[in-house]
Image: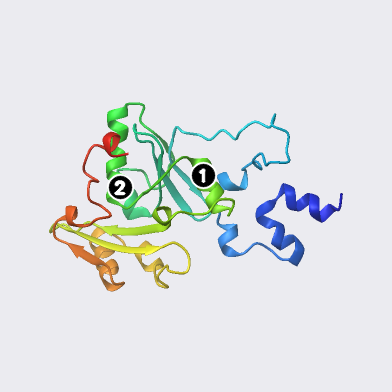
Amino acid sequence: MHILTLLTRVFPIHSAQLSLGRLPTEKEACLPKAAEERRVRMSADEPPSCPRTKYNTTKRSTFHKAGCDVFGWPSGGGMLRKSADAVELEHLGLARSQESTRSQDPAEEDAFCRKMRELGARWWEDEERYFDVLLGQLQITAEEAVRLEVGWPAVGGVWVLKFRSGRACPREIGRIRMARDMEERCRVIESLGGTFYADPEDCPDLAGSSQDTASEL
């Protein structure tokens, strides 16, 4: 078998780089460490004896080259995932420099999931689907493509910036990550064209975030 063909099968996310002889792009280099360690899934021409990848469902927050990812595990099933900055970690009550694990109490975990949804965390069927979509092995759905940046001002209400992943991402979205506190985060979201809702329940993308996560999902 040709060596390039073999490498392409083993390392699918870098096949283009192998053929072009270049280093990974910034986006590719910033894939979470779990993706870098991910084993190639069983395909149609591979023997059915290949085991499925097992993912860690006890993690709460993990750090990688691009920052921090936060996970929620609702009792209704699935997984909530959010790439969080320092302000969001504070809102969630998580340490900014230490990894953490999930609660083993379903009620506590659902309460944490509601807090994650207040920040626009996306729901996924499981982590395997997340990585399949991330690596282009499965098509992303319209719901999965929605991204929210959310700010909760002290005076009440909520600021929401909604866009789709990819090219629709605002060019200056990185300004939100530079906010020092939630109030500054709200001002940045406003400057980027965000929408203010005096009643958070009026925001269709957040409506129900304060309800029971188990029944909603």
Q: Secondary structure at mark 1?
A: helix
Q: Position of residue 122 (x, y in %)?
A: 38, 49
Q: Is residue 100 above or below residue 206?
A: above
In the picture of the structure, the residue carrying the numbered disc 1 is: 129
In the picture of the structure, the residue carrying the numbered disc 2 is: 117
Q: Is residue 111 above or below residue 28?
A: above
Give the Cα separation between the discs numbered 1 and 2. 19 Å
What residue is at 69 percent from the left and 63 percent from the top? Answer: 23
| Amino acid type, label 1 | Arg
| Amino acid type, label 2 | Arg
Q: Secondary structure at mark 2?
A: helix
Q: Residue furthest right?
A: 1
Residue nearest the observer in this picture, 115 or 88: 115
Marked residue nearer the N-terminal end (1 or 2): 2
What residue is at 40 percent from the left and 70 percent from the top? Answer: 170
* Left or right relative to 59: residue 95: left
Binning the other alpha carbons within 10 Å of mark 2 as few (below 14), some (14 to 19) or many (20 upward) gives many
Q: Quadrant of residue 151?
A: bottom left
Binning the other alpha carbons within 10 Å of mark 1 as few (below 14), some (14 to 19) or many (20 upward) gives some
Residue 160 visible to an observer of this rendering: yes
